[in-house]
Image (spheres, helix red, strand yellow):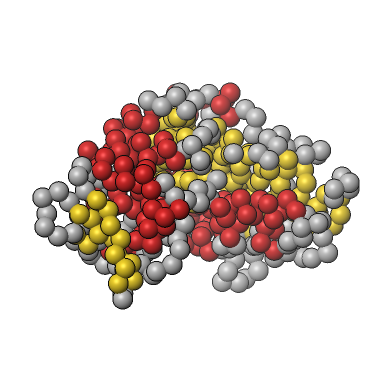
């Protein structure tokens, strides 16, 4: 389980580390930085898939995602006694991302490349990348250490060995080197990051993939665009929590029954509602009803992930569906670590009423995303490795 997330130098996040539990709620007013924290998690996962630089490019490039404020914000600036202004930088420009977890922790430090006169000089390079055992980063716990293109790994006997393989400065060691004997930790960490599951705002327009028939194949994990919704729901009915699925549908739409039809075009979602003479297909469902079924398929997955992240799951849902949604989220937290990003007051209240929920309230302070009522003790215990 992830114990902390560390982020430095990303958009509105100058420096932030957040403690996590089994069920976590990230909330706060619009513009406080909730989405930036969510995107930072996606970037960490991208290191495991090998798409970190592409993800940064899709966000506008390395220069556009960096913290744009002063390197440090003095107490005088916070009190309004001194204008916010830049100073001579004492530290290199960097974007740092990391997680403290059990059994392995990971961090990556990206910086600017040496200018080569190339059109790709905007791509960041990885300055440092580390994996260590436990939550404390020190010389004894470090088991994989990458500086630039040089990688060294600690063997089972505790001795360091250089890897005779130059790694491209823009690629993560997680995807560029795999040896189950010399460096099993790299494989374990890569697989952990790849196991994270993200569900963002689902498309529910007339051409949404979820409204089309699904390919008829066993589907324990729904795609992030919902294109295999019907197959995912049928898989839950056959090998998952079929009773929980039926209860979730009935709690939201009393008297309704979910059916999956199999035809020549593939599998289709059908909903039989009380008082109606025929079933409604996915093409006919309202945006809110379809989105709720997508969340049902995500939260009742027969193959629960280690980490499940939901970004504003309440979008387009009728207020009456918020309580059933909260119940599903709490149930999912029994099998996965869950992070929910939301500013919906009712959903926030529903989740915060659970004693296992950790509420992470963010706010903006002089353009910087910080923890509401946070202090220096909240940031204690996180250590970034030097370059």
Q: On screen, 303 above or below 27?
A: below
Residue 362 rendering spot, x and y as whole percentages: 43, 33
Residue depicted at 37% across the width and 40% down the height = 328
- Determine whether, in the image, residue 138 is placed left or right of residue 50: right
- Determine whether, in the image, residue 324 is placed left or right of residue 283: right
Of residues 89 and 16, the one drawn nearer to the viewer in this rendering = 16
* Quadrant in the rendering for residue 342: top left
Residue depicted at 59% across the width and 46% down the height = 97
- Number of callouts in the render? 0
Residue 185 rendering spot, x and y as whole percentages: 73, 50
Residue depicted at 41% across the width and 27% down the height = 354
* Quadrant in the rendering for residue 247: top left
Of residues 345 and 368, the one drawn nearer to the viewer in this rendering = 345
Quadrant where the image shows the N terminus = top right
- Determine whether, in the image, residue 31 is placed left or right of residue 204: right
Residue 27 rendering spot, x and y as whole percentages: 39, 35
Of residues 120 and 43, the one drawn nearer to the viewer in this rendering = 43
Residue depicted at 38% across the width and 62% down the height = 231
Residue 42 rendering spot, x and y as whole percentages: 50, 52
The answer to whether any part of residue 93 appears in the image is no
The answer to whether any part of residue 382 appears in the image is yes
């Amino acid at each position: 389980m992830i114990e902390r997330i560390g982020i430095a130098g990303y958009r509105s996040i100058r420096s932030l580390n957040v403690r996590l539990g089994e069920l976590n709620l990230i909330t706060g007013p619009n513009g406080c930085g909730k989405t930036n924290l969510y995107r930072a998690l996606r970037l960490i996962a991208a290191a495991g898939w090998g798409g970190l630089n592409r993800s940064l490019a899709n966000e506008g490039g390395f220069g556009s995602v960096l913290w744009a404020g002063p390197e440090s914000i003095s107490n005088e600036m916070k009190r309004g006694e001194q204008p916010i202004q830049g100073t001579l930088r004492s530290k290199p420009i960097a974007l740092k991302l990391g997680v403290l977890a059990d059994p392995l922790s990971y961090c990556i430090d990206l910086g600017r490349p040496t200018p080569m006169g190339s059109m790709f000089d905007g791509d960041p390079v990885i300055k440092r990348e580390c994996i260590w055992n436990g939550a404390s980063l020190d010389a004894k716990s470090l088991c994989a250490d990458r500086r630039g293109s040089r990688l060294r790994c600690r063997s089972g006997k505790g001795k360091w060995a250089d890897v005779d393989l130059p790694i491209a400065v823009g690629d993560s060691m997680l995807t560029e080197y795999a040896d189950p004997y010399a460096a099993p930790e790299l494989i374990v960490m890569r697989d952990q990051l790849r196991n994270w599951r993200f569900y963002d705002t689902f498309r529910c327009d007339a051409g949404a993939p979820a409204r089309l028939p699904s390919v008829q194949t066993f589907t324990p994990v729904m795609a992030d665009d919902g294109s295999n919704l019907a197959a995912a729901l049928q898989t839950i009915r056959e090998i998952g929590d079929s009773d929980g699925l039926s209860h979730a549908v009935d709690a939201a739409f009393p008297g309704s029954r979910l059916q999956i039809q199999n035809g020549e075009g593939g599998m289709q979602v059908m909903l039989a509602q009380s008082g109606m003479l025929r079933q409604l297909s996915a093409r006919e469902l309202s945006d809110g009803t379809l989105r709720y079924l997508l969340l049902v398929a995500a939260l009742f997955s027969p193959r629960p992930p280690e980490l499940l992240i939901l970004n504003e799951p309440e979008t387009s849902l009728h207020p009456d569906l918020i309580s059933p949604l909260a119940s599903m989220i709490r149930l999912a937290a029994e099998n996965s670590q869950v992070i929910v990003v939301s500013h919906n007051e009712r959903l926030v209240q529903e989740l915060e009423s659970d004693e296992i929920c950790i509420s992470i309230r963010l706010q903006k302070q002089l353009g910087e995303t910080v923890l509401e009522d946070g202090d220096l003790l909240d940031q204690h215990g996180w250590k970034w490795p030097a370059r």
